Image (cartoon, rainbow, N blue to C red):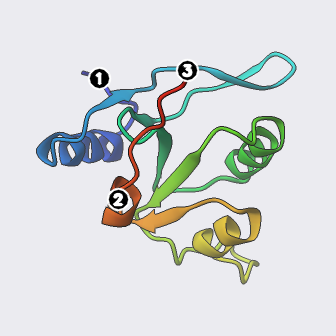
Amino acid sequence: MRYRSKAEKVFANILTDDRINFTYEPNRIKYTVHKKYIPDFYLIDYDFYIEYKGYFKSSDRTKHKLIKEQHPHIDIRFIFLNSDLKLNKNSKTSYGEWCNKYGFKWALKEIPSKWLTKKKRKHT
């Protein structure tokens, strides 16, 4: 499997080692006219996406706010290599604080075990 970054490859190996069933970039989610977003990982058994981030660009933050607004039923969560990094050199807001402000679940470096307790709902 080829990944877009070394960090994503490392995270995929963690998921594999933990025997967590996942697919990599399985879907495209439209979020504005003629724009598409490809989530990094989809955890099949838990029905949520993970965006694995080292650097959290302004354009990524804007994109995720739009996706959440237009697709509130899609569960996208963030794993940060460093959640204490500030949004930019003049900001007092960290990556983690940004997620809290906009209602995104996030964690530092790995998936919290509490995220893996609720199984995927079966749609009928």
Q: Nearer the viewer, residue 2 or 13?
A: 13
The residues bearing labels 1 and 3 have C-alpha atoms spaced at a distance of: 34 Å
Question: Label 2 is placed on what type of residue?
Answer: Ile
Marked residue nearer the N-terminal end (2 or 3): 2
Q: The disc labelled 1 sits on which kind of residue?
A: Arg
Q: Quadrant of the C terminus?
A: top right
- Amino acid type assigned to the residue bearing label 3 in the image: Thr
Residue found at the far right of this picture = 33
Q: CA distance from mark 2 to mark 1?
A: 21 Å
Q: Which residue is mark 1?
A: 2
Location of mark 3 (residue): 124
Residue named by callout 2: 111
Please report whichever mark, 1 or 3, sits nearer to the chain's N-terminal start. 1
Of mark 2 and mark 1, the one earlier in the sequence is 1
Name the side, left or right, on which 23 lies relative to 84. left
Q: Quadrant of residue 90?
A: bottom right
